[in-house]
Image (spheres, rainbow, N blue to C red):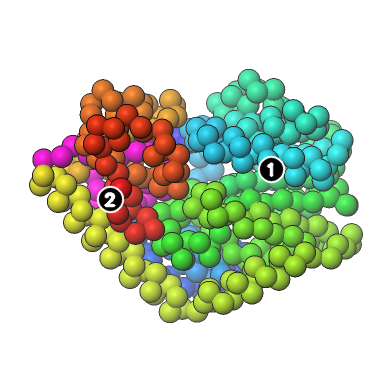
Amino acid sequence: MPENTTMPPLASNATLTACRACKAPSPYLFLPLGDHAPAQMLIRPEDLDRPQPAFPLNTQVCLECGLIEIADQIPADFFRHYLYVPSGAARMHTHFHDFAEVLAGIAGEELIVDIGSNDGLLLAACNTLGCTTLGFDPAENIAELAAQRGVETFLAYFTPETAAQVRDERGPAKVIVTTNTFNHIGDLHTFMEAICILLAPNGTFVIEVPRAKEYIEHTEFDNIYHEHVSEFSLLSIAKLAANFDLEVTDALSLPDIHGGSMRVFLTRKEAPRAPSDRVGAMLAEEMGSGMLEQSTYDELASRVEEMGRETRAMLDDLKAQGLKIAGYGASARGNTLITHFGIDTRYLDFLVDRNPLKHGLYSPNTRIPIKPVSAIEEEAPDVLFVLAWNFFDEIYEQQEAFRARGGKFLVPLPSPQIV
């Protein structure tokens, strides 16, 4: 997650002319969110007076496969220094521990490769089960954190060339897994070529990623930003996989992870396995939700604008009462939300975040200072505007002292409310 304000010129246009999954032409532009600096581009204090690069954030949808997507405008090497780590949320520790048991049951003693392995939280859990593992990540600073957990990281982007190098050095992978990384990939077809190079003939590719159905139902527009270029339907993954002789053999919904995610298992068609009943049920569920209908997205765009009006009205009322407001969570999705809604230092005195790598920096676009969570007690805001709303239950439990002194929460999604 870079923290500078210089970026090379764009190499791509502001809208897609074809779906990156199924290649259908002309995805429908339904939610132009204006110009945003990349949501993960936090600002150093010495750069506050410098302009940030800002690019159009134009949300489109493929009405052939249900992939919600934006054009990839992030330059090469953007992810070589990164600040997001999953270990900042207690829920992810439990989630990855349980997930590791699933992966270990598939892999046995054979190799598990995690693409976008980050700080090694998932693979560390696999290692405790006796698995053979390797992480793939381009961020050297994050790989150092993984090493402290005993996780080995191949420091590179995942490409056909690096996949072939690892296969030649370590052998094919029985399991390749990627969690909340698949939605970062601009060129999905090249990525899938690399999967097919590294995956063993009887191997399983497991994708865990936020799901488009929940994006629509809960108006989660903030989960699309310049680094999260896609929000997948199960249908979009199935259509993409078919281009590479892979098929979806199992899938399950994860409603409590990142606002609603899914876990999808793919295997080679040459090693056929009967799909579970859950695959057909989830595909039927998607079709029943109107995912391929233009009107669904027109209605969603209207809800986003109404949400913005309601949220600003609530904040205006709180400020009129003389209350002090801080934001909880210097997250990328939160930066998308406050940028689009025009919520800046006029409303929020500061943001807090549990990730120490973000402390002392400022949010992109809005330039709100980011402080440790301890600032809630030190500076005593009256209201916490919960930008990390997908972890609200966890935040609510942690902030017992804040609640005890009468503190309230403003939660913007799925609809603005005071708690």
The residue range painted magenta reads 322-344
Amino acid at the residue labelled 2: Ile
Q: Is residue 343 magenta?
A: yes
Q: Determine whether, in the image, residue 67 is placed left or right of residue 171.
A: left
Residue 400 location in percent, x, y?
A: 35, 32
Residue at 68% x, 41% y: name it. 98
Residue 383 location in percent, x, y?
A: 24, 40
Label 1, secondary structure: give it: helix
Q: Nearer the viewer, residue 117 or 122?
A: 122
Q: Which residue is mark 2?
A: 418
Pointer 2 or 1: first along the chain: 1
Residue at 79% x, 40% y: name it. 104
Q: Taking the image as drawn, is residue 300 in sight?
A: yes
Residue at 74% x, 28% y: name it. 128
Amino acid at the residue labelled 1: Phe
Q: Which residue is mark 1?
A: 99
Q: CA distance from mark 2 to mark 1?
A: 34 Å
Residue 374: image quadrant is top left
Q: Determine whether, in the image, residue 56 is placed left or right of residue 65.
A: left
Residue 202 location in percent, x, y?
A: 88, 52
Residue 416 location in percent, x, y?
A: 30, 56
